[in-house]
Amino acid sequence: METSDSLSYPHQIDDHCRDESGQGGSPTDSSTNMPNDFLRVLDERVLILDGGMGTSIHAHNPQPDDWGGEKFVNLSDAVNFSRPEWIVDIHREYFAAGCDAVETNTFNASKLVLGEFGLADKVIEYNRRGVELARRAALEFSTPERPRFVVGSIGPGTKMPSLLNESIYIHFDELYDAYKPQMIALVEGGVDAILVETCFDILQAKCALICALDAMKEKGVKIPLMVQITIQPDGRMLPGTDIAGALCTLESMDGIDVIGMNCAVGPDLMLSSVKHLSQYSTKKISVLPNAGLPEKRGDDTYFPLQPDELAEWLHRFVTEFGVNIVGGCCGTTHRHMKAVADRVGFKKPATRVTVPVSAASSLFGMMELEQNPRPLLVGERTNTNGSRKFKQHLEKDDWQTLVEMAQEQEREGVHILDVCAAFVGRDEARDMKEIIKRYNAVITKPLMIDSTE
């Protein structure tokens, strides 16, 4: 790891954030926790994560200089360099409140988001710095009896691979490339777990998780991997994915240790989703709500849920639904987390008995593969080998008619759509991509990808 003095930034770094060697806490320190300690705690008791980093930064009433300059205002990750003492103190406050782990201040530190601030070439440094500051606070509080952890935070970014809106669409491969250096930096920095959080698009979550697993494989390590989706007040993710569809997608991926939710809403609007996770998730569960739905008070945003109210909700989630990790998101402070720690600290979550489900998922929901009454109906008219009409309109690049054919089968009650674009003389991969991205946007049933090769 480079020393802080060697980094070239628009920000300066204060010396008091170094240890005696001139560097921050290293992942090779003897007191640094091994990754399996994190999972061991989850097997024994509830683990308490921290509250809102952005909320805590804004409590300092930052001015442009505190962000590192006018162009970096509201880039929370930049505060790692302009006001590192704030970030370390925020981490300390959460540990002092009773938290077991803090998230690195790297929510926006992907190449995609940093690139919007002209910092695309600073991904490695920004993420290493975030780990360094969090580790410094963790080492101050960690003991052999009670280890404290650093969780690498990866936010969703500003683009979505599942929607075709040109202003926010990003190709899956491009998004993967934007995440890769961040994942590598967090792994090399020595985080105790990786958290892909605030996922409002299930395809974005899948992309980030694949990237995280690939980064671990490249570095020859396995770090606990967490993912948290974000639901709207209607109980669905931004494109319309329900909790069953999201869980089905995530459960199908090997290597995920924790599946949960954070942000957007308070605990009351998470209740039904928490119940679903409790009943059907085979992984550990995390829940980090906002302090209620935000309200406007003049020019300020106010979150109404008080510390004791958040603690009461999270106590219920732990003792009734077996939630393994609790914490807070927007609007929550160290005072909220102290109330949570006082209420649920060191409790063992309720035992869950999960119900196995054999299913497939689309962008919008889940379809059980064992239908009652049988059979499972597979629509074959979106197949060049099964439909002359489909083949003819594919020849014309008539994408709209191909979409209408899929919608017609959906109206007729099929459970799954078989999609095949194999056609002599045409580019099958190109045709399949064009069809699937359009089907993803409007077809609610799962798609069966079919090829002659």
Image (tube, rainbow, N blue to C red):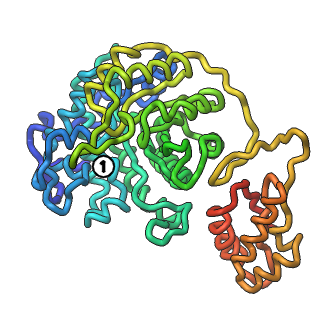
- Position of residue 304 relative to residue 379, above or below, is above
Determine which residue is flagged by label 1: 127
Secondary structure beneath dot 1 equals: helix
Task: State which quadrant residue 148 falls in.
Answer: top left
Q: Residues within 10 Å of mark 1 (few under 14, many from 20)?
A: many
Residue visible at 36% across and 37% down?
Answer: 329
Q: Residue at x 41, y 16 (%)?
A: 344
- Kindly identify the amino acid type of the residue bearing the numbered disc 1: Asn
**Residue 280 quadrant:** top right
- Asked if residue 373 lies left or right of residue 141, the reply is right
Q: Is residue 84 left or right of residue 49?
A: left
| Residue 26 point in image, percent of width and height | 26, 37
Answer whether residue 293 is visible to the viewer in this image.
yes
Left or right, 137 with reference to 421: left
The answer to whether residue 16 is left or right of residue 117 is: left
Q: Residue at x 16, y 43 (%)?
A: 84
The spot of residue 31 in percent (x, y) is 29, 25
Residue 55, horizontal then vertical, whole percent? 26, 40
